[in-house]
Structures are given as C-alpha cells and as structure tokens.
Amino acid sequence: MKLLAFSTSSEMLSVALLNDSQLIKEENHFLGLRHSEKLVPTIKDMLDASSFSLKDIDGFAIDIGPGSFTGLRIGLATLKGLVFGERKKIIGVSSLDALAENAATEPHPFNFFNCLICPIIDAKQDRVYSALYTLSEAKPHSKRKTKYEVIKIKDLLKKLNKKKAIFLGDGLGKYQDFIAQAKKETTFLPRKFWFPYASVIAKLGLQRLKQGKRDNIDSLSPMYLTPPIK
C-alpha cells in the first residue's frame, strides 16, 4: 500500500510517503502557521521525486489534532481537495498518539518501561492537551491509558501524583520549568521529540488501516477538546 501522510497541527509541517511500510521520503518544515503556502507544493515535490502520482496513492493518514485550529483546517481542506472524486482510504490520527509513539520509535538512552508517557500540547490559559500512555517492553509501542483531554497543567501534575513520568510535546516550551519545580522523578525529552512527525502518523495510520479501520472524508473533523464544565 502506498500511503501519504501529513501533519499540520503544530508549527512544524510534516509530510511523508510510505510504500508497503517502507518510508520512501519525509520532509519537515518549521513554518509557524504558514502551512497553506507549503503543504501542496511539498506533496507535489515528494510525489514527483518518487515517480508517483496521486492516482498511485492508495490511502492517506492525517493528523487530526488536537493542535493549531488554523493548521488543522488547512490540513483537512487540502486532503478533501486531494481525494475529491477519488475512492481512497482515509484515516485520522491524533497528535497525542503520534507524540507518544515518538518515545517508542526513536532511539534514546532513557528507560521508559516503568514510566507514564505524558505528551503535552499548549492549549493556552495554563491548559494543555494531553493523555497518558505506557510503553510495551515486549514490542515497543505506546498504549493510551486515559482519555484525550484539555486540562490545567497543575491538575495534570496532581493526576500523575508520585508516578514517574516522561514529558514531551510543545507544551514543554512554556511549562517545563514549572513541571520541574513541581514534580520530581520526571524526564523531559529533547525538542526533536516534541512534534507529530508524518512518518509516525503514517505508521499509526497504516496499522489501523490493516485492522480494517477507516474514516469517512465527509465526516472527518479535527479533534477539538473543551475544558470540563465545573
């Protein structure tokens, strides 16, 4: 299966092309919120360099957030344009799942198997988007243990209690010092782990497509999380 994946949920635009689970090419560009200028040209250049056309692509995996509202809308609008009139397999992948999977897919010197993996994405107003994950030692991959939520950073730390935690995600740019002061037994991953890479979106998307899961492009929408009503 030839799978094209992209992420527009953060300041980084990421596009990847897979062919039967093999990564053919990936491009990552830090653009702020200027994804609309670069997304389609990057896809075109990637297909041209790989000697593929859109007709050759069997499916698409897309980052559906949570993250930048503007970036997510651009990504979904672009996908709808690419598949208009075509019968392609579509799968949406959460940014938080992709971040957690970074802990399993990238080589690193940390032992994660007795820790909670805690990706955080800045949601403004002292809140983050987050979920908690564990890492399987038998076959390294992340497994989500809690629901996706938007939560005040102080409440997230209370939820973790005394459990060891590994933090990653762009929320660290704002909250790393606060977390370090408030919680011991904590590891912070370097900045290169903070973003949802398209290669990881593709990997997770392909796994779900092989399980028979797929999304309807007409009903697929960004993952918008709202604070609980108190």
Image (spheres, helix red, strand yellow):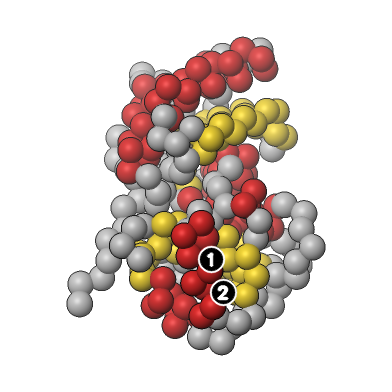
Which quadrant, please, contains the C terminus?
bottom left
| Number of numbered discs on residues | 2
Crowd tier of the residue under label 1, counting other residues whose Cα lies within 10 Å: few below 14, some 14–19, many 20 or above: some
Q: Which residue is mark 2?
A: 180
Residues at circles 2 and 1 in contact by the CB criterion of under 8 Å: yes
Residue drawn 69% across the image and 38% down it: 21
Quadrant containing the N terminus is: top right
Q: Which residue is mark 1?
A: 176
- Residue 11 numbered tag: none
Q: Looking at the image, which residue is at 72% across and 34% down?
A: 22
Residue 134 screen position, x and y as percent = 61, 70
For this view, does 69 lie left or right of residue 42? left
* Position above or below: 192 against 120: above
Q: CA distance from mark 2 to mark 1?
A: 6 Å
Q: Residue at x 36, y 32 (%)?
A: 74
Please, is residue 212 above or below residue 177 in the view? above
Q: Is residue 26 visible?
A: yes
Q: Position of residue 57 (x, y in %)?
A: 55, 23
Residue 43, image x, y percentages: 53, 21
Q: Residue furthest bottom?
A: 162
Three-letter amino acid code at the position of disc 2: Ala
Q: Label 2: state its secondary structure.
A: helix
Q: Is residue 85 left or right of residue 8?
A: left
Q: Residues within 10 Å of mark 2 (few under 14, many from 20)?
A: few
- Is residue 1 visible in the rendered image? The answer is no
Amino acid marked by disc 1: Gln
Residue 32 drawn at (x, y percent): 45, 36
User: Quick one: 93 or 224, which is closer to the camera?
Assistant: 224
**Rendered position, 224 above or below 198:** below
Name the image quarter holding residue 35.
top left
Which residue occupies 56% across, 87% down? 162
